[in-house]
Each structure stands twice: as C-alpha cells, then as structure tokens.
Image: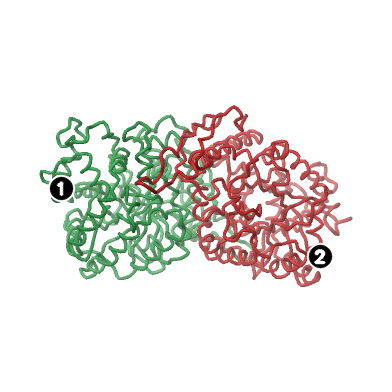
Chain colours: A red, B green
Amino acid sequence: MTAPQKQWILNAFAMHTPGHLNPGAWKSPVDQGYRYKDIKFWVDLAKKLEDAKFHAIFFADVLGGYDVYGGPKNLVPTLKAAAQLPVNDPLYAVSAMAAATENIAFGVTASTTYDKPYLHARRFSTVDHLSGGRVGWNIVTSYLDSAARNLDLETQIPHDERYLIADEFLEVSYKLWNGSWRDDAVVKTNGIFTDPDGVREINHKGKYFNVPGPHISEPSLQRTPLLFQAGTSTAGKKFAAKHAEVVFVGGLDPVLVRKSVDDLRKQVAEYGRDPRSIKIIASFSVIIGATDEEAEQKEKELLKYADLDGALALFGGWTGYDLATYADDEDFRFVKEAAIQSFVTHWSKYVPGSEGKVWNKRTIAERISIGGLGGAAIGGPEKVADELARWAEIADLDGFNLSYTTVPGSFDDIIKYLLPELRKRGLFWDDYAVPGGTARENFYGIKGQSYLPDDHPGSKYLWKAGEEQPDLNSADNISK
Amino acid sequence: MTAPQKQWILNAFAMHTPGHLNPGAWKSPVDQGYRYKDIKFWVDLAKKLEDAKFHAIFFADVLGGYDVYGGPKNLVPTLKAAAQLPVNDPLYAVSAMAAATENIAFGVTASTTYDKPYLHARRFSTVDHLSGGRVGWNIVTSYLDSAARNLDLETQIPHDERYLIADEFLEVSYKLWNGSWRDDAVVKTNGIFTDPDGVREINHKGKYFNVPGPHISEPSLQRTPLLFQAGTSTAGKKFAAKHAEVVFVGGLDPVLVRKSVDDLRKQVAEYGRDPRSIKIIASFSVIIGATDEEAEQKEKELLKYADLDGALALFGGWTGYDLATYADDEDFRFVKEAAIQSFVTHWSKYVPGSEGKVWNKRTIAERISIGGLGGAAIGGPEKVADELARWAEIADLDGFNLSYTTVPGSFDDIIKYLLPELRKRGLFWDDYAVPGGTARENFYGIKGQSYLPDDHPGSKYLWKAGEEQPDLNSADNISK
C-alpha cells in the first residue's frame, strides 16, 4: 500500500503566545513572536503565507500554564521563557486575517471540556461566515490541571470521560450546524426572510447536554468547520477515526508513525468512512538555509537563545514528568523512571547523530527548544525535502504542520528555500485547488466539497434544500 | 444642576443580525442588513463611522430567539421578519474592524450568566490587545428563556440572583485583569521575558466561582474593557452604579428619564464614585433628511417595509406580553392588562402626534419597527438636533446610541445631515480627543486614562509598576 506521489498539505503551525515551540527564541534579534498581541503581525503573516499558498495557519492553544517543572504549580520557568504563557485566545484574530486574504484557511484549537456546545456552535458559525468558509476546528479535550482548577473543577475530568463528553459535544454540534436549518431556509422573497419551515429544534437530550435548539446562526458556507484532531491515546484515536478530517501525528520514526497511521485509517474504515479521505499530517520543525552548512549555522545560533528551563517546563507540562527532581548531570538514558527513559532511548535511536549522545537536562532542553517533541529537519533545500519525502512515503502522510523556531523568519526560510524544491519535485501545489474556496474544498481539493463528506457521521444530519428534515433522534444516532 | 454645554458621545448601535430594531427593513432596496455575515460589510462600516468620528460601534446581542408572540416557543414571526434571528456572536468581527481603523471603539455585549470568568477574561483581554485597547464590554445577564433552555437550565436563573452572579463575575474579572499581572511584569531583559514576581494567582473563592488564576493573558492597554451596562431594574441599577462606566437609558419622556438618571448618579456617588464620570447615553432612532418633509417621506417609505408581526415578536420578547392573544382591532389604551395599558398610555402621552391615536397591533408594530421601544427623532437637521439637545439637557445625558432603520443608510444620513448641525452647535467633536487612543481615553476625553478611574471599585486591584501587589482578598472586598 505505497502511497502514490501526491501533493502535500502544508500548514504553518502557530500560537498566540510569544514562544510556541521555541522557548527563549524571543531573545533572537530576528524573532517577532512577542508581537502576537498585534493584529498587524497576524494579518501580515497570513498574507505572506497565502502568497506562498500555504493551506492553513494552524493555531495551538492551552487554557493554563505549564507548572509541573520544579512544581507543583510552578510557573517561574514558564513565565521567564514565555513558554506558551502568556497565551491569548486564537479565534479572535481570524476575522482580520480573513479580511486581508481570500484562500488560506485558519485551523483553531478549542476545547470541548469547558464550553457549552450551543455557544460554541455559534462561535464557529460566526467565524465561518466572516471568513467565507475558511475556518477549521482543532478539537481538544484539554489536559492541564492548571486549566481545570480555574474552571470550577477540583481536578480534571478523567481522560476517557473527556472523550465521551467530546463525542456528545460533537453530536450536538452536528445537529446544530447541519440539521437545524435547511440549506435554503433563508429565502428573502415574498416578504419572508427565513422560511420557518426550514428551521427546526434539535431537541438533543443526552448524558452531558440538553440542547433543544434551534441553532441561532444561519448555515455558513461549510456549516461544520473543517475538523482537526490530534488524539494519540486509545480513546483519542477512536474519537479521531470517527470525527476528524485532518489528524496530526508526531514522532521521530516514520516507521513507528506508519503503524499508528495504518491503525487510524483502519479505524476510520470501520466507521464506514473512506480511509484515504482522512488527511494525516505530521508536525515538523524545519531549519533550512541555502546549504546544509547554513542551516546548521542557524541551528547553532538558535541554541544560543534557547531557554533550557523553559524547554523543561514544556516537557513537564506535556508529559507530567518533572525533570527538576534530577541532578544536572543525570543521564536520562539510565534513569529508573521507565517513561522518561523510554523518551530518551527513543531519541537516542531516532534523532540523527544521537548515537551515544548523553541525554541530560541540557541536551533534552536543547532538543525541545528547536521544535518541541516532534520531528525536525535541518539542512539545505534538498536535505530537508528528502527528509520530508522520506516521512511522507514511509509514514503514509498527506502533509506537514510546519512549526517555527523564529517567526516569521522560519516561514520566510521555508518559502525561500523549501517550497521551490518541493514544487520542483511536484510535491506542493502552485496554487490553491479551489481559489477563493472554503477550507474543506482546498483540503480535499474538490470544488463543491464545502460540507462534511457523505460518509462522515456528522453528515447524516444534513438538511438539504428541498428535502424533508432528517430524523435527528434516529436509532442509529451517532452517539450509540 | 443644569448640565453645562458639553460635547456628546455618539455611538452607532448595531447587531450581527439582518434586522436589529427594524423588522422588515431588509425588504427595502437600500438596506444591507443581510450582509451582517460579510466581514467587508463590518470593515466598511467601521471605516465610515471612524471617518465621521463616532465614538464607538456598539453591538447588541441575544442568545436565543424571541418566541413569546403567538407562543409559547413560537419563532415563526421572528424568523419571517429576521427580527434579531439569525444572530451571530459580535466579538469575532472586532479584530477585522480594528485592523482597518485607529480610533473608533467597539462595545460588545456579552453575558455573565452562561460563561466562565476565567475564559471570558481571556476573550476580552485578547480583543483588547488586538484592537489596541479599543474594546468595551456591555455587561448583560441575559433575559430569554429560549437561551436558558439551551444552556443546561430548565428555566432562567431568577433575575436578582443573575445580578449577584454578575457581581461576583465582575470581581473575578477585575482580579484577573488588574491584579494578576504587574504593569511591568513583561520585562524582556536579561534573558527574562516575564518577571515571575510580577505575576500572581488571585485565589478567588466565592459563592459562584472558584478561580485561582493567574490570568493567562498579559495586561492589555486597558486591562479592563470599557464597561457598558443598561440595567433598569432595582438590582440592575445598583449593579450599574457600582460597575458601569457608560450606562444606556431609554424612554419617551426626558423628564421621566431624568429621574432615573439622577437616581443613578446618586447611587454612583454612594459607591464613592464621581457621579459625573459615569456617561449616560440614551438610545435613539433618527430618521433624518435635508428637510423635515424629506425625513417624513423616508419614514413613510420605511413603514411600507415594516414587518408588523416581527415587530410584535420583538415586543413579546422584550416585555413578555403576547399581543397575539388580542383581536386585530383591539385598542390597547383600554385593555385590562395593566402593564400593556401602561406602555400604550405612555406612548399616547409622549410620542409626538399621538394624542387621541388608536394604539392597536398595527400602530404599535409600526412604532416599534422604526427603532424599537426607545426615543425617535424624525425631521430635518435642525428639528432632530433640537430634539436631541432637548433630551440631553432635560435628561442630563452625555450622548446617544443611534440605531438604524436601514444600514448603512441611516448612518449615511446621520453623517450627512445631523453631524454638521451638531458640530455647528458645538455639540460634537471635530476629532477624537485622543487620536490613536484607547476606548476609555476617548470616552473620558483624558489622555492616559486607559485603566479604570481610581474611584472605580475594580481599580483597587490594580497592580502598578514598581508597587507591592494589592491584597486581593482584603476585608473591603468589593463583593461584601
């Protein structure tokens, strides 16, 4: 099942924070991450990325600080490094970026754990309207105790229950977005703005939510935003297989990632969905220059600015492991804590040039400071393109989520050095598949594919023009 | 205590819906209200209003449909007329409007009843950052059962308890916005992005909310958005007196409104605040032309498009009274239902030319369809300016919230006919008091007044540069 040569999906991976996956990079004279509060920064970035034909800007988000390292509840290294704190809400800059562009999509992270589906559905309908159908939703269930504590919970809702809530949250959302208004409900003729026969309550009564409806936004171009997800747990993957249209994967070895990808596509098929229709994308940090040497020089320069404690704070938040309890010279290849050792032996095995390398706090932090826990490709155009192509083929990927080490510098480099090489190889498009189209049209490359595909479980609720309203409480209810 | 001649605050009153206070106007060939989904519509409107030096665009919002008329739960007339349904979330278009302007402020309605203060605080901090300190928050507690039912409540929380929740919600918000980060916490020097000694938890433990903090957004230019409120009940006025900086009032007789204004300013003083610092603004519908005759002609034209059932649906939602239970020829001046009779005898007394007028469903609906329940001024420049000036003087007002009967037509007319007349009389500024300034600087007309005034209860939490952190749990806690 070798994937045919195909053109990749490329997203720019960003966050409304001074330091996303590059703690300390704010000290670099070229980094402008601190301008995350400035709407002109985002508008300029969106225009630049659209000129280069990026599919989307994809925005991560967290609802609390990383407080595990040297903790509990220790935000000192996180604040010093601006390691994803402060962090603003990513959904509010979209309208400004959309007003200045016509094609690029906006993937925005939002949690199902702390919001109400009725209000959330209107938020995304609003932004889908304002962006001309260019919004995507990265569905997360949140994983930080620091967020839960601020949202009226003593501690987090257990992991698997968060996915049950998310599943019902999505069901309510589909009913509101797809089933509450008929396509042609807004008629604007014969003195009638909206045909009342084209609007209905959804009368959702579930375990976690009771939502009679109707949705109070009229249908937007996509109705349902393009659905992103990144679950890696058993529950997370099951959720992704059912709901997601674009899935993020990460890792250091494409062979291992392939196992996960195959498993995911298999589960997708089990839900009756086309396993090739789901887009699987790996997060990657790219440091690229005109030559391999130039890129290596850039990496060295970046490492000068790395905030090592900030990197370990990110590690603590992501994994729950507090490396502050270890000595500075501890070699984590040999620690007793199996999970940490497993991380590190994984790096030893798969990070290029790591054989025999000592993984202590410093070297772990350096690794994290240039792109987080995911893959990294460092070199000139050919080397980076080779590495991405190797990944795409071995792991059966549909594209990449490219993070920055400095912003907008990393994207300038990618545009200057990587994209021409990819285009030479036929791996990246010259223009949007559907210029002026919706996010879904451009991600699927199919004009007219603005709604969920027919085989997606959310599409069964779709109330089409001229048709009877679908039964929203049918026995094959998707939550069953 | 006659108010001295002062320059007014003028806001444009809008809503993300095809029909705000003008049900049926979408049928007019000049109305563009249906473009509420189009970001270019809002950007163009913001630029136009900024060119004319409007203080702000002020956005109403509701979280459910008006379903009382012919009800219960009857949305038929509401949908047909597009009477504030469909309705999108008003906070998402702000960044686009802000990116295209430099001075105009954005007042946005949001409810304290269904959101979490921790998330809400970040939403407004984000938009205050992105707009360069130009956001205001119209604090509402929501009043529609149709919203409550969709937000996990069988029915609404009782009115006065909603204000208790709102009061604590504000307290949490002040602590997050003003007290969690020191002014100069973000240092960006010596390898430190944020000084951890400049960030603190707020550890709020209250009756309705437990929020340890810290706030995850750094301080925005205003920290606290400019606070709008429109409470008219006893609980609502008490809340306004304590928290609001700009208060909306409405009515048909400036003498009666003056009583309410005097009472409000008195209560403001009882909270230790300067009673003149609170800006009191009346909502007004203006239909204006080159001459009185032209304006009257416009009104006649508008009435041709009025959707009378839609107007009665608005009336039902606002008041709770279902006029559908009465015959078409019922003269409401003589009905038994005291509250309805009171409305109507009020109109008979104060709406110009109403003496002896029959108030039946049609005439009530016509009245509502050209601007809702509030004041209306119809005429040429002198007549309208006279009427507004009479109101400002008698009711001791600081300005007006001007609604539209068609959009952007009403604002075009106001800009063309009304503003020159007001400027001639010295009643409206030639330019923003603080060009490029924050909403609060321009509303108060004081350069440097970006934070809450010192006598505002939320300012006690302000953590200034170089100062010790304020005691957030002091005995004179504002909720006590």
**Extreme residue toward the right, this view:** A356
Chain at tag 2: A
- Find residue A352 and report its horizontal and vertical position in percent: 84, 58
Along the line of sight, which residue is nearer the eye, B343 or B30? B30
> In the displayed structure, does residue B112 sit left or right of residue A446?
left
Within-10-Å neighbours for mark 2: few <14, some 14–19, many 20+: some
- Find residue A247 and report its horizontal and vertical position in percent: 69, 47
Q: In the rendered structure, which amino acid carries the disc numbered 1?
A: Tyr
The residue at the point 68 percent across, 51 percent down is: A314
> In the displayed structure, does residue A347 sit left or right of residue A313?
right
In this rendering, does residue B173 appear at all?
Answer: yes
- Find residue A241 and report its horizontal and vertical position in percent: 69, 40
Secondary structure state at the residue bearing disc 1: helix
Along the line of sight, which residue is nearer the eye, A354 or B288? B288
Residue bearing the label numbered 1: B350
> In the displayed structure, does residue A199 sit left or right of residue A260?
left
Secondary structure state at the residue bearing disc 2: helix
Q: Is residue A34 above or below residue B257?
A: below
Q: CA distance from mark 2 to mark 1?
A: 80 Å
Along the line of sight, which residue is nearer the eye, B54 or B439? B54
Q: In the rendered structure, which amino acid carries the disc numbered 2?
A: Lys
Q: Which mark is residue A383?
A: 2
